[in-house]
Image: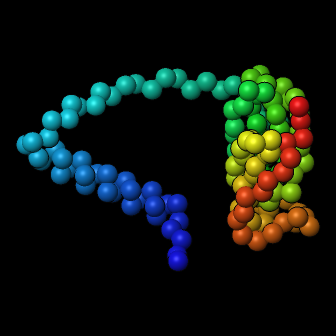
Amino acid sequence: MGFVRRRDFLGFTGAAFSVARIVEAQDPRSTQPEVPLRKPNAVVKLFKSPEGHPNGLENTNDGLRIAEEVSERAYLVDWTGKVLHKVDTESHNTSGIAVGWGYLWMSANGRGVGRDPRPTDRPGGEILQMRSQDR
């Protein structure tokens, strides 16, 4: 079974959506109301990540979880960016973070980039499960 790259998938779904909208617009039976467009709210920069290479974010009751891509650390910070807890992980080229069922979950994309190789680096993508070593 082959894998579809994210870019190809998004391009395909965007094209399919566009075709569907054109066909729908030409159908006189279409009764869907026009979707109103809103001006987006302003972007608010809250704070910089602890190490400057965030590549995963999760909102929890304890605060925000940030996955740092280069160091492979997971941080728990409050809404001002103050570090509440830090966990060194065995992730590699981290690209996501989640918390659930008492565990910390990290998605790894393969060998680390932007740093020297580590013994925990492995080829290929995988999901890592580790104890959430805090509160």
Task: Tell me the quadrant of the picture where the C terminus can be found.
Answer: top right
Q: Is residue 92 left or right of residue 118?
A: left
What percent of the width, then of the height, locates residue 112? Answer: 80, 62
Residue 132 found in image quarter: top right
Q: How is the image coloured?
A: rainbow
Residue at 72 percent across and 31 percent down: it is 60
Q: Residue furthest bottom?
A: 1
Q: Is residue 120 visible?
A: yes
Relative to 5, residue 76 above or below: above
Residue at 82 percent across and 34 percent down: it is 76
Q: Is residue 81 visible?
A: no
Q: Residue furthest front?
A: 101
Q: How many marks?
A: 0
What percent of the width, then of the height, locates residue 5? Answer: 53, 65
Q: Is residue 25 left or right of residue 39?
A: left
Q: Residue furthest left?
A: 28
Residue at 45 percent across and 26 percent down: it is 40
What percent of the width, then of the height, locates residue 88? Answer: 90, 48
Residue at 80 percent across and 59 percent down: it is 92
What percent of the width, then of the height, locates residue 47? Answer: 74, 28
Relative to 112, residue 49 above or below: above
Residue 83 found in image quarter: top right
Relative to 64, residue 125 above or below: below
- Front residue of this view, candidates 72 and 127: 127
